[in-house]
Image: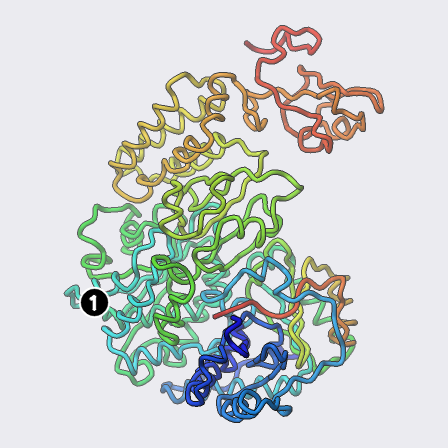
Amino acid sequence: MPLQTNETKGGRTMAKLTVEDLKKIKEGYKAERALREGAFRVKVTVHMGTCGLAAGAREIMNVIIDELDKRGAADVAVSTSGCAGLCSREPMITVQVLDEPPVKYCDLNEEKARRIVAEHVMGGKVVEELALVRGCETSY
Amino acid sequence: MERYRANLMLCGGTGCIATGSLKVRDALIEELKQRRLEDEISVTLTGCNGFCAQGPILIVHPDEIFYQKLKPEDVPYLVEEHLLKGRPVEKFMYREPLEKTTVPSMNEIPFFKYQVLRALRNKGLIDPEKIEDYIARDGYMAAAKALTEMTPAEIIKELKDSGLRGRGGAGFPTGLKWELCSMARGDQKYILCNGDEGDPGAFMDRSIMEADPHVVLEGMIIGAKAIGATKGYIYVRAEYPLAVKRLQLAIDQAREMGLLGDDILNSGFSLDIEIYEGAGAFVCGEETALMRSLEGKRGMPIPRPPFPVNQGLWGKPTVLNNVETYANIPQIILNGGDWFRSLGTEKSTGTKVFALTGAVNNIGLIEVPMGIPLRRIIFDIGGGIKKGRRFKAVQLGGPSGGCIPEDLLDTPVTYEDIVKTGAIVGSGGMVVMDDYNCMVNVAKFFLEFTADESCGKCPPCRIGTRVMLDKLIDITEGRGRAGDIELLEDLAGDIIRTSLCGLGQTAPNPVLTTIRYFRDEYESHIDQHWCKAGVCRELSTFYIDAEACTGCGACARACPQDAITGERKKPHVIDQTLCIKCRTCYEKCKFNAVKVGPRDMFKGDEAHSTAGREE
């Protein structure tokens, strides 16, 4: 299986956490994610809140995994997350290529998802006519 | 800003804050002060630049130099070289990526541009089923701080400083609630979370529980420490299966890591949290009814006082807060009350999450600073009204709220200003309505809901809402009489004054606000038997304006009754004996040629074959 969703680290079995442990997990997980981002060139996040699932996000997830499998892509992480906010445009995914701002795609179907995998995830070229927005929201 | 010779624009986006831009800001301010540059050079936190992978990002104006991946320790060198000696520091600069793109950034799309994420800061960024994802974004750091470094009084002070008010609808100051409960005497105290979101069209709390369940747990841990509770319950409606599943998973993970249970983080503080699934009664969102339901009794409210902070669940001191309230708390503990106040207004601080839905183009979950005008939410974030129709009203606060008309759209969204309109901010349901809506019918819809959901304990609510509903049904079916509007207003006042709980006390609001702003619609229903929006079937007649009709035939093809006839490119006619008033032609016509007339407009008019109609 060349693909991995972000699997859990061994930290789970730890009996009693201290504040130091918590900080270590935080830094460690960040480092691990950075490493991963080294090993994984692209991260694809499928938004799977109730709105996304109702619009067919699970199918989109399967299509993306299938398409990546077919292409034998070993450097792409597929992850799930909650509602991206724009429920009327689900299913949505976010594609983040290393060192580039994340790009959100909306109103997806199987065909569009396969095209995004082929052109953006594998080819590194944003599918401009399907992309909604790049970057992330203000938060402070 | 002319008086500054340079402006430092530091990215305050989600990504950059996660990589430490607030620390860089502090270092910049400190360094500028030391070098006595603070009057010459400003530091501003901006929205996300979109280059989150390169954060923290700093743009120096007017030079337009773009620095990336800054650390606090880089700051002295940067300030000395660039700002004192005027030599931009190449090693911190951003290198242009290989390819340019025409995909708009968030700042170019109004839906994203006007939003500021706090309660939703992890929205769409973390995997809600992995606690490490949450921890990596400062998760449980606030709990660690509260448990190991702060006294209950300090936590409460921070909350009071923040000005945070309950996000469930009533807007009670959270810090004060916690303080009252912390002072209450009891061998056992409880901390509860209200996830019984029941307003039609509202889905804020569901989304938070689904997307970021750990933030709810962390907020509860901090609250538990503040009031001295050792046991917590999250009351979630069973209709939210995904939220229940993800919350349960979060609780299991937190227990396994020792973030719930005995002696959390070696602080000596213990708390366990359980989920209780509610059966979906609207009244169980009311705090005393929710507590009865949790006790295993029928969910009915009891009179207050005594207030739950003194005698709540099983008669013990209890704090109940809403999901979104808890989602704000970890950030307040980490960043301080003053930081929280930096957005919003004096009395309504911070941000509010809204479920924006109805006739707007962009339907979704949004978070905006308090004080933003309604117009900005509906026309910029929401993208205006669908199908080019006209805005008519926005319904805030669900069945407890009210409808706000167009001429009040510049009202800022704050607890005080919205109450003045007769509506309430409520839990955050925001239903936008276009001119195809009949406001009497809207009031009837909400009253049907509250009359149905009334628990029946007190007569004003049980009988009063029913009588009001019957009146509204009469009006929408053509049996309205002179004096009905006054009777409704009178009844509404009585129900508000004498009902036991919030359900009854607010149930008349949709009726009162629609009478206040759309009285002419009530009057035309009663006096002219005319529903001008064509919604109330008994009070409308659909006909085609021969001058406006182009004879395109779209209406005739859509009519399920084949009631519309006419030659191509000639005006069409609706056979009134066949018309079932489904409104399809009215909605299909692109030329506004289908009109709505009063019930009796063709009475006795043979040409329109209305002879057989009743009355």
Q: Quadrant of the N terminus of chain A?
A: bottom right
Nearer the observer, A25 or B10: B10
Badge 1 amino acid: Ser
Circle 1 marks a residue in which chain? B
Which residue shows up at 55% across the image and 88% down it?
A: A31
Question: Mark 1 sits on what residue?
Answer: B182
Quadrant assignment, res B190:
bottom left
Vertically, is B536 above or below B87? above
Q: Is residue B364 above or below residue B264?
A: above
Q: How many numbered discs?
A: 1
Q: Which secondary structure lies at badge 1?
A: helix
Image quadrant where residue B224 sits? bottom left
> Residue drawn 62% across and 76% down?
B51
Q: Is residue A115 toward the left or the right of residue B71 in the image?
A: right
Near mark 1 (Cα within 10 A), the count class, few <14, some 14-19 or many ≥20, is many
* Residue drawn where x is 27% and y is 79% of the image: B150
Residue A7, placed above or below residue B205 = below
Residue A1 visible in the shown view:
no
**Foreground residue among B254 and B202:** B202
Which percent across, then down, holds residue B451?
A: 38, 35
Locate residue B180 relative to residue B426 in the image: left or right: left
Q: How is the image coloured?
A: rainbow
Q: Position of residue B196 (x, y in %)?
A: 39, 54
Residue B386: x and y in percent read: 64, 44
Q: As drawn, which residue projects farthest toward the left?
A: B185
Q: Position of residue B257 (x, y in %)?
A: 40, 81
Direction front: furthest residue = B3
Residue B79 at least partly seen:
yes
Q: Is residue B143 above or below residue B369?
A: below
